[in-house]
């Protein structure tokens, strides 16, 4: 049983993290611009699902392996870089402003959001640094406490990032009717994904 005071302290801290612009928020922005509000929400759900996987791994103690083995950190990181660059290339190839423009299923946006989150090893290192501050070994199973705190972060992140995707999706729909603006939108979306890839490539373990 988590102490209510501890939980009340954790909630505003988690909300502040959710509201801080970062890679997850930018990814949902890009997905919303690329495929509309539904894709933005789906990407946000995928990111939250990926975050819960990270929280579960950290709660099981496996996160220490990522922290202790530099090569594992780098393998995961470069897989994420490659995937983001692949998404950037796909955004460049997508044709906006035409009736032939493909409709991107929401399930693909969910998958992309989850994979991008899972291939960012910095997430699990953050979880290992942040959540244990609120863990009380005397309050019950460690994993259960990790999961409770993880759900709080996941719900807040889903709402905040989903709203960003909703806004971007509405903007994207207004722009896609014009082929010239559509090309600009395509390049902007690709630029967001490429910038996230660069950010991940430059990450350090500390």
Image (spheres, rainbow, N blue to C red):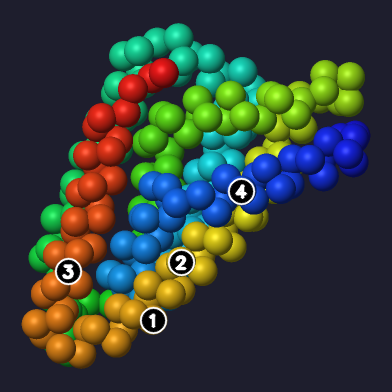
Task: Point out the frontmost of discs 3 and 4.
Answer: 4
Residue 90 showing in the rendered view: yes
Q: Earlier in the sequence, mark 2 or mark 1?
A: 2
22 or 55, which lies in front?
22
Q: Residue at x 57, y 30 (%)?
A: 127
Q: Give me the disc on residue 186.
A: 3
Q: Residue furthest top?
A: 68
Which image quadrant: the N terminus?
top right
Are the residues flagged by discs 2 and 4 in contact, CB closer than 8 Å? Answer: no
- Secondary structure, mark 1, is helix
Are the residues flagged by discs 2 and 3 in contact, CB closer than 8 Å? Answer: no
Q: CA distance from mark 4 to mark 1?
A: 25 Å
Residue 38 showing in the rendered view: no
Mark 3 residue crowding within 10 angstroms, few (<14) / some (14–19) / many (20+): many
- Secondary structure, mark 3, is helix
Q: Residue at x 62, y 29 (%)?
A: 130
């Amino acid at each position: 049983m988590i102490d209510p005071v501890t939980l009340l302290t954790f909630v505003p801290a988690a909300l502040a993290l959710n509201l801080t612009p970062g890679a997850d928020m930018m990814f949902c922005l890009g997905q919303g611009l690329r495929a509309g509000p539904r894709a933005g929400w789906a990407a946000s759900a995928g990111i939250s699902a990926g975050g819960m996987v990270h929280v579960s791994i950290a709660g099981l103690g496996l996160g220490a392996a990522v922290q202790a083995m530099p090569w594992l950190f780098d393998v995961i990181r470069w897989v994420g870089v490659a995937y983001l660059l692949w998404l950037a290339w796909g955004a460049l190839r997508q044709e906006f402003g035409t009736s032939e423009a493909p409709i991107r299923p929401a399930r693909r946006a969910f998958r992309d959001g989850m994979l991008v989150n899972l291939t960012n090893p910095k997430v699990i290192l953050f979880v290992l640094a942040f959540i244990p501050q609120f863990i009380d070994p005397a309050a019950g199973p460690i994993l259960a406490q990790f999961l409770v705190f993880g759900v709080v972060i996941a719900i807040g992140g889903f709402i905040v990032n989903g709203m960003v995707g909703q806004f971007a999706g509405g903007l994207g729909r207004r722009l896609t009717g014009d082929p010239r603006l559509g090309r600009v939108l395509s390049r902007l979306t690709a630029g967001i994904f490429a910038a996230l890839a660069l950010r991940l490539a430059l990450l350090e373990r500390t």
